[in-house]
Image (cartoon, helix red, strand yellow):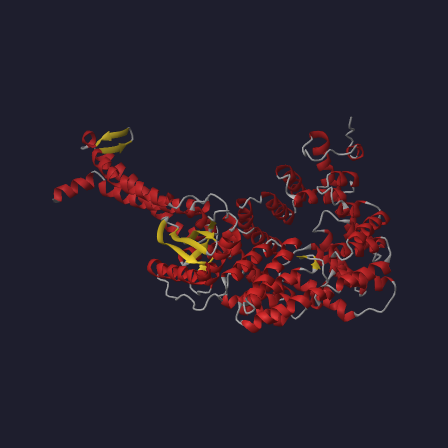
Amino acid sequence: MPAFIAELQRRNVFRVAASYVVIAWLVIQGAETLEGTFSLPDWFDTGIAALLMLGFPVALVFSWAYEITPDGVKKTADVADDLPTNHQTAKRLDLITLGALVVAIALVFVQPYLVPPTSDVAKSAASAKTTSSIAVLPFVDLSPEGDQGYFSDGISEEILNVLAKIPELHVTSRSSAFSYKGKDIVIPEVARELGVAHVLEGSVRKAGPTVRITAQLIEAETDKHLWSETYDRQLDNIFAIQDEISAAIVAALKTSMGLSSETPTETVQETSGEAYSSYLLGKHLLAKRSKSDVERAIVEFDKAIALDPGYAPAYASLAEAWYLMQSSDSTPGDMTLEASLARAEPALARALALDNGLPEAQGVSCLIKQRKGLLEEAVGDCERALAINPSLTNVRTWYSQVLEELGRYEDYFTQQRIIYERDPAAYLAVNNYAVLLRNLGRWDELEEVVARLKSLGYGGHAVSFEAGALQAQGKWRESAFTIFDGRTRYPDTLGLGEATSFMLAAFQLPEDAVAIWPRPDNPGPILRLTASPEEALRLTTARLAADPDNLEMIYSATFAHFFAKDYEGARAFAQKALERIPAQGRNTSPLFQIITAVDWLEGKPLNEADIRQWIDKSLELIEVGYIAAGNHRDLAVAYTILGEEDKAFTHFKAFYTSEFQILPRDSVLLDFTGWNQKPRYMALVNAALAEGSAIRDALLKSACEEARFPYWQPSKASCALIGTPLE
């Protein structure tokens, strides 16, 4: 035995083994880093490790049978007596092992800096997958006529709401889960996209008073069915079926993941089958959010209430529907706020009287109180609703808006992140979070969210965020070309079409801006930027006459009158619009800024306290990281009105050095202050205009000489600006 060990030493087998182990460890560490950095499959590093393990005995056999010499690889028997060669080989292996050890020790210390840090969102998604988590996909409608989709959706949503009340269970929101409706799906892929470990799917077959519901719980990682069941019942027993399904899911999760919670009792208020069917149809219509659909939803909720006057969920949804009937920039109706609330509030009061713990009713109460400016009370209502059902993404959205209005920005940021995490497949949730990250300048985190937008099929929307990131780096030319090229790649993305047109208007190319405007049915927005103030006022007045209660048109009329120097008209429309804005936000609205500017121009007394509130709001936004240039513009105007010239100039400078395109509204709001007579101000303006002119000329060169943008054929006058005549 000692002789055998001596022979192993002579043939450097031990040295080869040591070198192999150290180098293999380094290779495995590299594989793990590559897997995380390039999003390689989970099996990548495991496969590398397996190959290295298989190679280990091969390396030992090779070291026994062969020797590496200065003359190449030779059989050990041929160099058995060549002691210098054996010594050189041993020394070479020692150096290799020592070098590998040095690298390994260094890697232990530097590896944390080599792997990109995982964002909060990614960490949360990973955490969700390792805990009890589930997505409830919309059940398939298998009814004979195929007209019960609203009913099957409603069943799915009710089960989701029951499961969402279990504290230990992470439940993906309705909008993300329902985004897969009607699609051919692969369960493991859906689970990975939603960040869940389990998926519930099923079908509903409703025929007359009977219903058949089939449900199955799937473990995403293995695609294994943990539980499945079929229920044949009378429609009046639908609530019992929902409770049975929820209880069965919890029982299955207890077995597979150690879930300790029980199914909540009294989770769904029962009613008659007919009333429930009307309620679900109303919810289905309400989710569409068009005026006609909301009106039809009101009819269905009224029908459900007539069949069961004690059914609280129908009253809560009716209250929300009447709220949506007001005319505002976020609601589709045409009623005044007062008329809308006169219908919504009695329905809400009845819902709360019947069931004060109904989360949907608490959520609508939050929404209405926010609209009335009762923000602290609204916070309490939203928090009560979310404590009962954390998956109500619409309520969480309202909650975040209230927090923002209250200036609780960190809490607002947190809620926006939670919405994104719970609703990773919903466009609005992802886009809103991207907007927030862009405004905060968190470009590294934004990259991940932009990738999510692209994966959802919104590549055109992602372009604007990519352009914003370039602009933040001072790469304004690249940012502009990203927008213009983006419209070529995504011609159906309305936002890119409007952005290119607005940019041409800012670059003083009005004819071209109008020609490429993507909404020929509504040319007002671009004409108001390119036409003379008098013509813009005429166009706005005509549109307002056709739709006098449209809040967007009242906004437009305010600025149109201001641009045309009809200050009393601007004041009148601004005051009319302010009446429809919550009291908490009035002093920070652009409409208030217009009224203040008009008062200042006309020499009327000013309320300095209100102006200071305007200033404090803008400063607070800047302090928490908001980078929107408009905050600096607002501060410049406010300080000018107060006569604090140096502070005003500081914010003028920040504004003009963060924007390469100055839209007409910006220039009017700034020039009316008289700064256009001051040299240091005009130096800023001229520098911004020079930057804009250089970008304009680069775009024109690409359009006139290369025909780079298929949607834009510049006018002769435009091409003449760069000396390129057109035929």
In the image, residue 507 sits, relative to residue 282, either above or below, namely above
Answer yes or no: is residue 424 visible. Answer: no
Q: In which quarter of the image is the C terminus?
A: top right
Residue at the (20%, 42%) spot, across then down: 9
Q: Which residue lies furthest to the bottom in this view?
A: 353
Answer yes or no: is residue 718 visible. Answer: yes
Image coords of residue 225 (percent x, y): 35, 51
Image coords of residue 286 (percent x, y): 60, 57
Residue 363: image quadrant is: bottom right
Image coords of residue 86 (percent x, y): 23, 36
Q: Quadrant of the N terminus?
A: top left
In the image, residue 520 sits, relative to residue 404, either above or below, namely above
Q: Which residue lies furthest to the top in this view?
A: 727
Q: Classify residue 363 as left or right of residue 197.
A: right
Between 425 and 627, the one lying in front of the other is 425
Q: Classify residue 54 as left or right of residue 626.
A: left
Image coords of residue 642 (percent x, y): 80, 66
Q: Classify residue 8 as left or right of residue 560.
A: left
